[in-house]
């Protein structure tokens, strides 16, 4: 199954679509594609001959969210690769699992090493990219993919899947930055800033994958507690994270000391 365009995805998330609209995204028969879709992270249900994302009716407390962070040796998945990945699974406000791995890499620049603390030597005995991608896909399953700046992490991992002859991800996903901006006011929404201002993860090591995934998990759980009462399903949460009104940012940084302001 091919990834859906935004218009089709919105219909699958809300009022559903019929088979004629679904057909252009299928490469095989409908029955086979629906059987294979969960292997790409997506579950589709049918009701009254219309097709929907299963998350359309999944209550938040029943959903499993996978909060993900990756470190890479560059920004382009066609030329670069993942060097570390960390992920935390959450259901009904509780952490139920985690995954972490360095990835074997033959070239990590000094800049990246200084930023992450990960050197080429450190990854020498790490699992291969192919193995880590397979392990991560199995860990992720059909969970909702969450990341701080989800566009980068999601698109990079999905592109790496395709680069290693795997099917692209189809998991429903949301951005913890977008959700935070709509659940509380902050001068900035960068992960390091929010960790300091909200004291989310006291032993955090910024730019290490599992540590950042844990910090994002704590941020995500905070946002969930601040949701309006009418956000009850996964798709309502995704829609809220994209369309609800953002909080107004303070004019001055409350983290700055008086001496710094002068």
Image: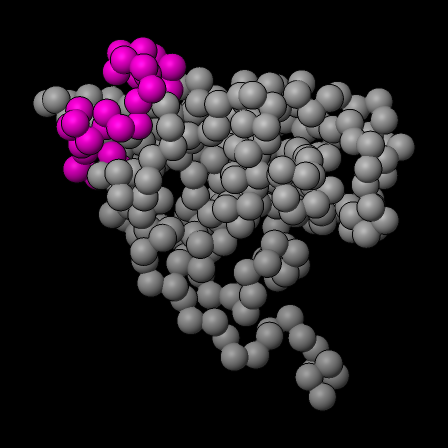
Image position, residue 79 (x, y; %): 68, 39
Viewer-closest of 157 and 212 = 157
In the picture, residue 183 is in which quadrant? bottom left
Picture layout, residue 65 above or below residue 185: above
Prevalent SS, magenta region: helix
Q: Is residue 32 magenta?
A: yes
Residue 43: x and y in percent read: 34, 23
Residues 222 and 81: in front is: 81
Which residue is drawn at the image coordinates 85% and 49% (left, top)? 110
Looking at the rendering, which quadrant does residue 189 occupy? bottom right
- Residue 129 showing in the rendered view: yes
Quarter of the image for residue 68 reads top right
Give the x, y percent position of residue 152. Answer: 55, 46
Residue beneath the point at 50% across and 46% down: 151
Q: How many marks?
A: 0
Task: Tell me where the magenta segment starts and ends, as one range.
Answer: 12-37
């Amino acid at each position: 199954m091919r990834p859906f365009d935004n218009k089709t995805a919105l219909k699958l998330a809300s009022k559903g679509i019929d088979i004629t609209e679904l057909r252009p995204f299928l490469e095989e028969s409908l029955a086979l594609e629906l059987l294979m879709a969960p292997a790409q992270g997506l579950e589709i249900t049918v009701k009254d001959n219309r097709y929907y994302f299963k998350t359309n009716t999944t209550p938040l407390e029943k959903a499993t969210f996978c909060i993900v962070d990756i470190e890479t040796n560059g920004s382009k998945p066609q030329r670069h690769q993942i060097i570390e990945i960390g992920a935390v699974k959450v259901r009904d406000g509780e952490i139920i699992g985690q995954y972490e791995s360095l990835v074997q890499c033959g070239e990590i620049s000094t800049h990246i090493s200084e930023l992450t603390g990960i050197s080429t030597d450190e990854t020498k005995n790490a699992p291969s990219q192919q193995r880590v991608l397979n392990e991560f896909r199995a860990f992720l399953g059909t969970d909702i993919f969450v990341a701080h700046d989800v566009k980068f992490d999601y698109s990079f991992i999905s592109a790496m899947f395709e680069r290693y002859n795997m099917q692209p991800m189809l998991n429903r996903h949301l951005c913890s930055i977008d959700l935070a901006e709509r659940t509380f006011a902050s001068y900035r929404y960068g992960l390091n800033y929010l960790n300091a201002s909200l004291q989310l993860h006291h032993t955090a090591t910024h730019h290490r994958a599992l540590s950042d995934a844990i910090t994002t998990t704590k941020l995500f759980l905070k946002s969930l507690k601040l949701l309006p009462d009418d956000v009850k399903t996964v798709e309502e949460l995704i829609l809220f994270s994209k369309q609800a009104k953002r909080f107004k940012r303070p004019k001055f940084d409350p983290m700055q000391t008086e001496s710094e302001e002068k």
